[in-house]
Amino acid sequence: MANIWTCDIPVSYLSHHPVSLVVTRALMVIKGILSIIASPLLILGMKCTTIIKNDDHHKVQFSKAAMILLLMGGISGAIAVFWFALDTALKYRTEVGKKMESWNILCSICVSH
């Protein structure tokens, strides 16, 4: 049966959570950190910035480093979203399947009498 949390039950971040939820949160935190680190590198790699004096080699290197960090962050975020969506869909399907089975049994008992 799927674990459904409502607003009635206080949920603590320190309480026990499923592994999929913890990994999803960790991947999203990693995505955020990588994106924040990549932002200054991307600004340093822009041709219009004059922090680094017209040294195209270093600007290209900063741009490549920012690209790699943003790509890793994007992949991390995509994995987290896909994993959470898949986990939610499987839990929902399992829960709906169980309720539908019980509904079908109930209907068959009512119809047979």
Image (spheres, grey):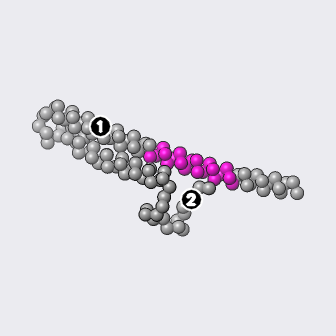
Which of the two residues, 15 or 89, is positioned nearer the viewer here? 15
Span shown in magenta = 80-99
Query: On the picture, is 69 further left or further right than 77?
Result: left
Residue at x-position 30% and y-position 37% = 68
Going by the numbered disc 2, the residue's amino acid type is Ile
Query: On the picture, is 76 further left or further right than 43?
Result: right
Query: On the picture, is 20 further left or further right than 35?
Result: right
Q: Is residue 39 magenta?
A: no
Query: On the picture, is 96 further left or further right than 37?
Result: right
Most common secondary structure along the magenta stretch: helix
Q: Position of residue 62 (x, y in %)?
A: 22, 37
Q: Is residue 37 visible?
A: yes
Report the residue marked by disc 1: 67
Residue at x-position 65% and y-position 51% = 96
Tag of residue 4: 2
User: Could you give the CA–CA distance between mark 1 and mark 2, rounded to whole angstroms?
Assistant: 39 Å
Above or below 31: residue 53: above
Going by the numbered disc 1, the residue's amino acid type is Met
